[in-house]
Image (cartoon, rainbow, N blue to C red):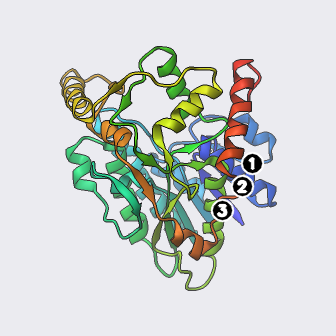
Amino acid sequence: MHVLVTGGGGFLGRAIVEQLMSRGERVRSLARGAYPELAELGVEVRRGDVADADAIATACAGVDCVIHTAAIPGVKQRPEPYYRVNTRGTQHVIDACRRAGVTRLVYTSSPSVTFTGEDQCGVDESAPLATEWLEAHRSWYSASKARAEAAVLAANGLDLATCALRPHLIWGPRDNHLIPRLIDRARRGRLRRVGDGTNLVDMVYVDNAAAAHVQAADALAEPSSPVAGRAYFLSQGEPVNCWQWIDQILALADLPPVAKSISLATAWRIGAVCEQVFRFLSIDREPPMTRFVAGQLAKSHWFDISAARRDFDYDPAISTAAGMERLGEWLRLRAGGSAD
């Protein structure tokens, strides 16, 4: 294959690029940064933004398959950046694939596109997109991803086979988002348990999530592939207690477990106030709490991954225990200033 990975320098994108390169594929990366470490691997590195239709059109020229991971994450209260990159940027990718004759498109979505503030226990892909609820509760990242996922799946056809993958809480070495933020908040004494601490969540080790993207891309090459036009949840296949897992991560960084807690109702009210204040004052950073974040931290959300197992042989090869060992080693190297 000749594969374009958007966001190839990111946490998930880099893992996908490395797995493709290890198979001997020809890989091109489109990212906003330079990422010389990718060039050293033999990747064709191009700088650009998916929000730039011309940049993505040029990047798609001559490739067989696009794996689209680039996105803006977070819970900032200005919707425009999320829709510009996550939604319109994805439409640029779809349009560019069609013009360039790309035959396969794998899109990185999110399980949060189905979240409505309630427990999700063993939910499968029949759960509808919760776009309107997410927009009403100002979760612009998830709402923009929901609209993008719908566009990707609607684009599936004879000339372009598409699918969407929903990896939940991607973690592992080189994480620049989830793990560092948890550790930073804990060190500053700003981490609070939300809810009663019994909620179960799914998560997925980064190399398992990357492998699923490669497997899905392979499956889309098959005539009448069952993967085409579908979305799939991805996880370790074994939900964990959210707050016990967070305590385990903190322990890897030699930090004590979370000691203070707050009720979901209180966190929800604080989140609503934070949203109003940040919106009124046009503050361009993430609030310390939002209603969406409160729900995510207090409610159970774990998913049925049997469809991914069945349709493209997804099997999380790296166990949670093995992944935690790797994460611990990386955190120790990072503390010593030698982590990649």
Q: Position of residue 262 (x, y in %)?
A: 31, 27
At label 1, counting other C-alpha atoms closer than 10 Å, the crowd grade (few under 14, some 14-19, many 20 or more) is many
Q: Say what amino acid the circle numbered 3 marks.
A: Val
Q: Say what amino acid the circle numbered 1 marks.
A: Val
Q: Can residue 88 be seen in this view?
A: no
Secondary-structure class at tag 3: helix
At label 2, counting other C-alpha atoms closer than 10 Å, the crowd grade (few under 14, some 14-19, many 20 or more) is many
Q: In this view, does 285 lie to the left or right of 268?
A: right
Q: Say what amino acid the circle numbered 2 marks.
A: Val
Disc number lying in front (2 or 3): 3
As drawn, 62 above or below 37: below
Image marks 2 and 3: residues in contact by CB distance under 8 Å: no
Q: Residue at the spot x=69%, y=32% of the render?
A: 328
Image marks 1 and 2: residues in contact by CB distance under 8 Å: yes
Q: Which residue is most to the top?
A: 188
Say which residue label 3 marks: 214
Q: Where is residue 89 in the image (x, y as percent from the top left)?
A: 43, 50
Q: Position of residue 200 (x, y in %)?
A: 44, 48
Q: Residue at the spot x=18%, y=24% of the render?
A: 280
Mark toward the start of the polypeptide (3 vs 1): 1
Which quarter of the figure is the C terminus placed in? top right
- Residue toward you, 35 or 150: 150
Query: Gap between marks 1 and 2, in whole Å?
Result: 5 Å
- Residue toward you, 53 or 322: 322
As drawn, 192 above or below 202: above
Say which residue label 2 marks: 27
Say which residue label 1 marks: 43
Query: Gap between marks 3 and 1, in whole Å?
Result: 16 Å
